[in-house]
Amino acid sequence: MILDRDYSILITDDDPAQRETLREIFEPVGYRTFLAESGEEAIDIVKDQDVHLALMDMNLPRLSGLEAITIFQQIKGVIPTILITAERDDNLVRKALSANAFCVLAKPVSRNVVIYVVTRALEKYY
Protein backbone atom coordinates (compact mmCIF):
# COMPACT_ATOMS: atom_id res chain seq x y z
CA MET A 1 0.00 0.00 0.00
CA ILE A 2 1.37 3.41 -0.87
CA LEU A 3 1.56 5.55 2.22
CA ASP A 4 4.33 7.97 1.26
CA ARG A 5 1.81 10.84 1.35
CA ASP A 6 -1.17 11.64 3.47
CA TYR A 7 -3.82 10.41 1.04
CA SER A 8 -7.45 11.14 1.71
CA ILE A 9 -10.38 9.09 0.50
CA LEU A 10 -13.96 10.30 0.13
CA ILE A 11 -16.40 7.48 0.88
CA THR A 12 -19.94 8.17 -0.31
CA ASP A 13 -22.79 5.74 0.30
CA ASP A 14 -26.32 6.24 1.58
CA ASP A 15 -25.90 3.08 3.69
CA PRO A 16 -24.15 4.03 6.98
CA ALA A 17 -22.90 0.46 7.49
CA GLN A 18 -21.23 0.45 4.06
CA ARG A 19 -19.55 3.81 4.75
CA GLU A 20 -18.31 2.60 8.11
CA THR A 21 -17.02 -0.71 6.71
CA LEU A 22 -14.97 1.11 4.07
CA ARG A 23 -13.69 3.62 6.63
CA GLU A 24 -12.58 0.72 8.87
CA ILE A 25 -10.59 -0.73 5.96
CA PHE A 26 -8.68 2.45 5.11
CA GLU A 27 -8.17 4.50 8.27
CA PRO A 28 -6.15 1.86 10.19
CA VAL A 29 -3.56 1.74 7.38
CA GLY A 30 -3.04 5.49 7.31
CA TYR A 31 -5.60 7.00 4.94
CA ARG A 32 -7.66 9.99 6.02
CA THR A 33 -11.33 9.46 5.21
CA PHE A 34 -14.25 11.77 4.59
CA LEU A 35 -17.72 10.24 4.77
CA ALA A 36 -20.74 11.45 2.80
CA GLU A 37 -24.24 10.02 2.60
CA SER A 38 -25.30 11.83 -0.59
CA GLY A 39 -23.87 13.15 -3.83
CA GLU A 40 -24.53 16.70 -2.65
CA GLU A 41 -22.59 16.13 0.57
CA ALA A 42 -19.74 14.57 -1.44
CA ILE A 43 -19.60 17.64 -3.69
CA ASP A 44 -19.39 19.93 -0.64
CA ILE A 45 -16.47 17.86 0.70
CA VAL A 46 -14.67 17.98 -2.67
CA LYS A 47 -15.08 21.78 -2.70
CA ASP A 48 -13.68 22.21 0.82
CA GLN A 49 -11.13 19.40 1.26
CA ASP A 50 -8.11 17.91 -0.50
CA VAL A 51 -9.58 14.62 -1.74
CA HIS A 52 -7.17 12.23 -3.50
CA LEU A 53 -9.65 9.47 -4.35
CA ALA A 54 -13.41 8.90 -4.17
CA LEU A 55 -15.30 5.68 -3.52
CA MET A 56 -18.82 6.44 -4.75
CA ASP A 57 -21.99 4.41 -4.51
CA MET A 58 -23.83 4.64 -7.84
CA ASN A 59 -27.36 4.70 -6.45
CA LEU A 60 -27.70 7.66 -4.15
CA PRO A 61 -30.81 9.72 -3.41
CA ARG A 62 -31.29 12.65 -5.83
CA LEU A 63 -27.79 12.82 -7.38
CA SER A 64 -26.22 9.54 -8.60
CA GLY A 65 -22.57 8.68 -8.07
CA LEU A 66 -22.02 9.14 -11.80
CA GLU A 67 -23.58 12.62 -11.76
CA ALA A 68 -21.42 13.56 -8.76
CA ILE A 69 -18.25 12.47 -10.61
CA THR A 70 -19.10 14.87 -13.44
CA ILE A 71 -19.52 17.73 -10.96
CA PHE A 72 -16.24 16.82 -9.19
CA GLN A 73 -14.45 17.32 -12.51
CA GLN A 74 -16.00 20.76 -12.95
CA ILE A 75 -14.77 21.72 -9.47
CA LYS A 76 -11.31 20.13 -9.27
CA GLY A 77 -10.55 18.29 -12.49
CA VAL A 78 -10.25 14.51 -12.48
CA ILE A 79 -10.30 12.86 -9.06
CA PRO A 80 -9.68 9.12 -9.30
CA THR A 81 -13.10 7.67 -8.59
CA ILE A 82 -14.19 4.10 -8.04
CA LEU A 83 -17.90 3.61 -8.60
CA ILE A 84 -19.53 0.90 -6.48
CA THR A 85 -22.90 -0.56 -7.43
CA ALA A 86 -25.15 -3.54 -6.85
CA GLU A 87 -26.28 -3.29 -10.49
CA ARG A 88 -23.07 -3.45 -12.50
CA ASP A 89 -23.61 -3.91 -16.24
CA ASP A 90 -21.73 -3.08 -19.44
CA ASN A 91 -23.76 0.07 -20.10
CA LEU A 92 -22.95 1.49 -16.66
CA VAL A 93 -19.27 0.58 -17.05
CA ARG A 94 -19.15 2.42 -20.41
CA LYS A 95 -20.82 5.50 -18.92
CA ALA A 96 -18.52 5.45 -15.88
CA LEU A 97 -15.35 5.11 -17.92
CA SER A 98 -16.43 7.87 -20.29
CA ALA A 99 -16.95 10.05 -17.18
CA ASN A 100 -13.32 9.25 -16.23
CA ALA A 101 -14.13 6.86 -13.38
CA PHE A 102 -11.16 4.61 -12.61
CA CYS A 103 -13.38 1.52 -12.52
CA VAL A 104 -16.73 0.09 -11.43
CA LEU A 105 -16.90 -2.51 -8.65
CA ALA A 106 -19.88 -4.73 -7.93
CA LYS A 107 -21.34 -4.92 -4.42
CA PRO A 108 -20.60 -6.59 -2.18
CA VAL A 109 -16.97 -5.48 -2.50
CA SER A 110 -14.34 -7.65 -0.86
CA ARG A 111 -11.74 -6.03 1.36
CA ASN A 112 -8.82 -7.32 -0.73
CA VAL A 113 -10.34 -6.13 -4.01
CA VAL A 114 -11.12 -2.62 -2.77
CA ILE A 115 -7.63 -2.24 -1.24
CA TYR A 116 -6.03 -3.43 -4.48
CA VAL A 117 -8.10 -1.13 -6.70
CA VAL A 118 -7.58 1.92 -4.46
CA THR A 119 -3.81 1.28 -4.40
CA ARG A 120 -3.71 0.93 -8.20
CA ALA A 121 -5.72 4.12 -8.72
CA LEU A 122 -3.46 6.11 -6.38
CA GLU A 123 -0.35 4.74 -8.09
CA LYS A 124 -1.71 5.72 -11.49
CA TYR A 125 -2.71 9.26 -10.54
CA TYR A 126 0.01 10.13 -8.01
Image (spheres, helix red, strand yellow):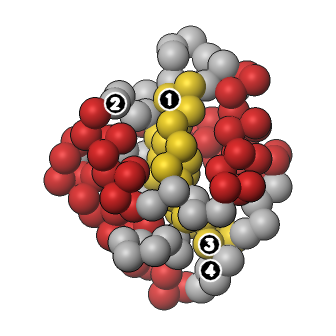
Which is closer to the viewer, label 2 or label 1?
Answer: 2
Instruction: Report if residue 88 is visible in the image.
Output: yes
Any mark on residue 88, and which?
Answer: 4
Marks 4 and 3, how far apart at CA:
6 Å
Residue under pointer 3: 85
In the shown orientation, is residue 20 left or right of residue 7? right
For badge 1, the amino acid type reads Ser
Residue at 36% x, 72% y is: 63
Quadrant in the picture for residue 15: bottom right
In this rendering, the label closer to the viewer, 4 or 3:
3
Q: Indicate the position of residue 46 as horizontal and vertical percent values.
A: 32, 41
Q: Which residue is mark 2?
A: 49
Amino acid type at circle 3 is: Thr
Q: Secondary structure at mark 2?
A: loop
Q: How many callouts does the rendering have?
A: 4
Q: Is 30 situated above or below 43?
A: above
User: Which residue is denoted by mark 1 in the rendering?
Assistant: 8
Marks 2 and 3, how far apart at CA = 25 Å
What amino acid type is highlighted by mark number 2? Gln
Question: Which numbered mark, 1 or 4, is in the foreground of this view?
Answer: 1
Q: Quadrant of residue 33?
A: top right
Q: What secondary structure is found at the residue carrying circle 1?
A: strand
The CA span between labels 2 and 1 is: 9 Å
> Mark 2 or 1 closer to N-term?
1
State the residue lying farthest toward the top: 4
Q: Which mark is residue 16?
A: none
Q: Could you tell me if the residues under marks 2 and 3 are in contact, i.e. CB atoms within 8 Å?
A: no
Q: Quadrant of the C terminus?
A: top left
